[in-house]
Amino acid sequence: MRSLILAGLWTVSTMAFPFVADVPGIDTSALRTARRSPHDKRQSTCPFNPNHPGAASYNSKYSYTGAKNGLPGTGVGGIKVPADGDTAHTFEAPGPNDIRGPCPGLNAAANHHFLSHDGITTFNELVDMQQNLYNVGYDLAVLLATIGVALDGDIVTEKLSIGCDATSRTSVAGSLLGPEVGLNGHNTFEADTSLTRNDFFLANGDDYSFNGTLFKMMSNTCQNNFNRDNLALYRFQRYQQSKADNANFYFGPKTVLLYGAASFLYSLFPSLGNSGVPDLATMKYFFGAQDGGNGGYTFNNQEQIPPNWYNRKTPFRTTDAAEEVAALYLKYPVLFGGNVGKNNFNALSYGPITNGNFAASAQNVWCLLYQVATENVPSSLTEVLVLPLQVVTWATGKLNPVFKDSGCPLKVP
């Protein structure tokens, strides 16, 4: 029955794609709605681990913030992670059959069994892990888990690969959006201008592997202080670099997530979070970076929580993330849009973005994050990802309760 429903979900759109501003030379008859971007890499070699352990369980002795089963924890942090004696969350490097992806924070969580060690996780695991490990606020934990599962995973099983396409393990009957590409999928969580990952089109689709040259560039810019000012500059440098080098460069609405990810380096990764020191030693642990000689870096496959590490004292909520995204962006504002060939940049308009210019207030960021999860959003200059009603219904069911006081217009499917 489900396959019959899926067959009728998709039709070719003849809309004029008003989000594209001034795109010369494009035949609009070629524009189409997208189930998935054809640029998503299908990894035939995605690791397969027949042992799916699930995340290590929490107990009364090692409860951290007390988050369990996708429900809110206490939000009281300043807790040592892993706690002394908690052998269930001891670091274990990934094996050749374990999936890892572009997000060092998730990779480290899986390596410590806060997520399933094989890299196939669930909505509830993601919500619990973010609270217990990093003391992310429940609202932001739900938002990020919802975006991940809705756009890159399966809303029926609520499973997600933290890396490559593992549809056979995340879905039981095929996905509403076609293959479930996992977090490696281009232009959802992963996008051009990543801190330490290649642009999709500059690396034959490898937008998920650690790039030591980029880590060195980030380190040189930040000079042992990965704070807001320095990371804002580095994000600007990566934008200029990608825009100049990548003929298919795209910087769309979902790219606000990359600013959020940058803020994690000084808000979540230091011991005690925003009260701690965002130094190079800390980043090397989380990114799995080791000295490679001549000032360069190589990947050691050991993304992990630093020794004697404590999570932040107060929860990092959606409002905090929105404020950081706006602050990072406003340090060095750039245009949203993309290249149609080298040296041919075209701006886009969507929501608070007009002709490429983003009205970057914390409120606009907050509402844009909701839109990314619940509305049809441009996934390139020539494509828009149309979310089926079932996906929208699932996403709004998760998000509307935590956004009810946001002041954002909420969608009622």
Image (cartoon, grey):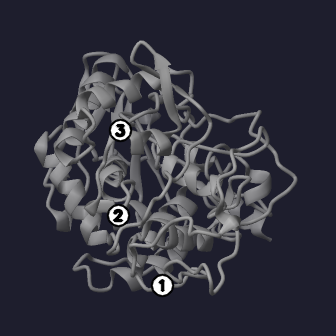
Query: Is 337 situated above or below 81?
Result: above
Q: CA distance from mark 1 to mark 2?
A: 20 Å
- Whether residue 339 is visible here, answered yes or no, is no
Q: Which label's residue is closer to the chain start, 1 or 2?
A: 1
Contact between marks 3 and 1 (CB within 8 A): the answer is no
Residue placed under numbered mark 3 in the picture:
280
Residue placed under numbered mark 1 in the picture:
72
Q: For the residue carrying disc 2, how many other residues have a C-alpha within 10 Å: few (<14), some (14-19), or many (20+)?
A: many
Q: Position of residue 183 (x, y in %)?
A: 56, 48
Residue situated in front as seen by the camera: 332 or 167:
332
Q: Position of residue 111 (x, y in %)?
A: 64, 52
Q: Position of residue 388 (x, y in %)?
A: 55, 64
Query: Is 317 situated above or below 191?
Result: below
Q: Nearer the viewer, mark 1 or mark 2?
A: 2
Figure quadrant of residue 39: top right
Three-letter code for the amino acid on which mark 2 is drawn: Leu
Quadrant showing the N terminus = bottom right
Residue placed under numbered mark 2 in the picture:
272
Q: Which label's residue is closer to the chain start, 2 or 3?
A: 2
Q: Mark 3 falls on what kind of element?
A: helix
Q: Nearer the viewer, mark 3 or mark 1?
A: 3
Residue situated in front as seen by the camera: 38 or 60:
60
Q: CA distance from mark 3 to mark 1?
A: 32 Å
